[in-house]
Amino acid sequence: MDQPKVDRPKMPDGYGLDQATKFVAWTTVESKLRDATHYWLSTVDPSGSPHVVPRWGVWLGGGFWYDGSPETRHVRNLNENARCALHLEDGAAATIVHGLSEQAEPVSGDWGIRLSDEFSRKYAPTYTPGPDAWAGEAAGGLRVLRPETVLAWTGFPNDMTRFTFS
């Protein structure tokens, strides 16, 4: 994954962004995304209503990999409109990913091992998928969210940072 462009988001006057002096490092953001165990995923249904669900998942290879039955509301929403937002639980030191979520191609081999190991590290003993859990027809439940932009801060507004991916 290429390094993102780093800048400040546009915000109305009065939020203090004009006094910001630091940027959050992308390595810090990736570490938070990798270490988190609970994420909030926001989608929009075809009528325009928002839908938010908690998700388990892993940040690996520059994307957020997670399971979701094709029958769930959030996956049906994403099949209509792949745009979504992912937020970590911490609102004071926020990490917000905006991007596109799509069904992953079937996974096996080394990539299956990496995904399996990471899911198991984070969620054992509750969830320990095998390396072939997403091979063949089983791949239908695996999705990947690729970031377009990420907003992050550890001390608002002093280090509010926007990362943009091309």
Image (tube, helix red, strand yellow):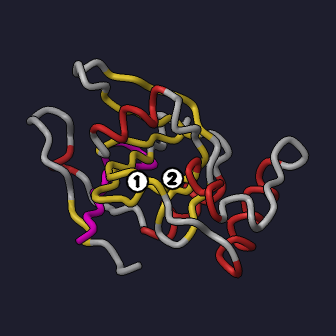
Give 115 or 33, whichever is nearer the viewer.
115
The label shown at residue 143 is: 2
The label shown at residue 102 is: 1
* Mark 1 secondary-structure assignment: strand
- Secondary structure mostly taken by the magenta-highlighted segment of the chain: loop
* Depicted 23 relative to depicted 18: above or below: below
Q: Position of residue 70 (x, y in %)?
A: 52, 38
Give 108 or 2, whichever is nearer the viewer.
108
* Depicted 29 relative to depicted 57: above or below: below
Q: Is residue 77 visible?
A: yes
> In the image, 42: left or right of 14?
right
Q: Is residue 32 visible?
A: no
Look at the image and give the residue range highlighted in magenta: 152-166
- Indicate whether residue 163 is drawn in magenta: yes
Quadrant where the N terminus is found in the figure: bottom left
- Identify the residue shown where x is 36% and y is 59%: 147
